[in-house]
Image (spheres, coloured by chain):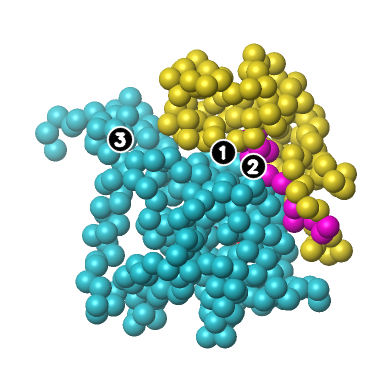
Chain colours: A cyan, B yellow
Amino acid sequence: MSRPEHLAPPEIFYNDDEARKYTQNSRMINIQLEMAERCMELLMLPEDETCLLLDLGCGSGLSGSIAEDSGHIWFGMDISGSMLKVAKEREVEGDLLLADIGDGVPFQPGTFDGAYSVSTLQWLCNADKSSHKPAKRLYTLFSTLLACLNRNARAVFQFYPENVHQTDLVVSQARKAGFFGGLLVDFPDSSKAKKYFLVLMTGGAMPMPPALGTENSQINYTSKREKMTKGRASKLVKKSREWILEKKERRRRQGRTTREDTKYTGRSRSGRF
Amino acid sequence: MKLLTHNLLSSKSLKGVKVGYPLRIVAKDVKISECEFNKEFVKKIIPKLDWKVFVNAAVEIGQTSDLSDELIEDYEDDDDYLKKVHHLLMEVEIINGELICPETDRVFPISAGIPNLLLNENEVS
Ligand SMILES: C[S@@+](CC[C@H](N)C(=O)[O-])C[C@H]1O[C@@H](n2cnc3c(N)ncnc32)[C@H](O)[C@@H]1O
């Protein structure tokens, strides 16, 4: 499989065409949403509290919709105007900024309760301009990010490292910038399900969360996900008309196929069939 | 762009800029998009804001409000007050305009609600 980051710089690769394609492929959408959910879980945010989060490389706002579902407020940064345009069309709730995260994250100290990034960090491991030095750009990202996080906040990046050299580069720059933490690999033995997460912590060395699909962690991915989904939908009575409408609205925003609302939506069936 | 974002954003990614805060705003189009009043969030975010910058920004973009330069003391129990803050912070959106770096006067255009913070090669620190 060819890597998009080898083809062109991100702001060129993610043009209008690619941005539209990206947000219409339901198989891909589901993978992005699943990874965003896992990031959200790894952030270990305080329960029942609205947090302010930063989405690094937010694209068309798929990952942001997971933050919204969990009741959080988010800002998104992305280098592609086309991706952000699609995000605006999808009426995401997050405020959007057109910016290169390799130039730094320009927020005031202590702004965010957490930061996450889905499928973006590998782009920074490439030099797209002669002036680009990946190590320096990663260091700028991590050091400015650390400065605008709250105490005890975490940052979680799902990404697609090309080789060990890249994971080493990313981890070493994050540590140099002052973060604790490291790499977490879910389903390390499955070529298909294997996923890399850079889990960064502030304010002291803490144990890494367990990876999924390994022998020493017997956590089942689907059951965990079901639990999460339950948790966040519980604000409204399950199966009520309001609950269904809210859920459908969310699915629409996420670009998933959803049936039209009618006056029958949420009514109980007569039992004849 | 919401005033919440403006209150937390700087231009310190620019080479040579020390603080880069607060950014000046020129608003050409402003839109109100209603969103749910989340009282707990407003209460939680107020201490993080630079209050004077917030009140000034609202005036700068032509929003009239009776919020004074000083944050009132017992805002946590004052629903009306919190709702006013929510409105200015979360519902007023700058659609077209400019953000301007206070140290270098570099202009960052805002179009379709999105500030363009992309830097030229020679502006990166
Ligand atoms: C695979 S998409 C992921 C989008 C979104 N996080 C999701 O999960 O659907 C990668 C995104 O990273 C963005 N990106 C790549 N390099 C970037 C950089 N240096 N700064 C900001 N965004 C970047 C691209 O424009 C693209 O929108």
On-image quarter of the N terminus of chain A = bottom right
Disc 3 residue: CB within 8 Å of ligand 1: no
Magenta stretch: includes residue A234: no
Coordinates of residue A84 in the picture (x, y in percent): 64, 49
Element type at mark 3: loop
- Tell me the amino acid under the disc marked 1: Lys
Residue B72 to residue B106: above or below: above
Give the residue displayed 81% in from the left and 44% down from the top: B101
Q: Does label 3 lie on the same chain as label 1?
A: no
The residue identified by callout 3 is A235
Element type at mark 2: helix
Q: What stretch is highlighted in magenta?
A: B3-16
Coordinates of residue A246 in the picture (x, y in percent): 37, 35
Of residue A20 and residue A175, the one placed in the foreground of this image is: A175
Element type at mark 1: helix
Q: Which mark is residue B48?
A: 1
Give the residue displayed 36% in from the left and 80% down from the top: A188
| Quadrant housing residue A205 | bottom left
Magenta stretch: includes residue B6: yes
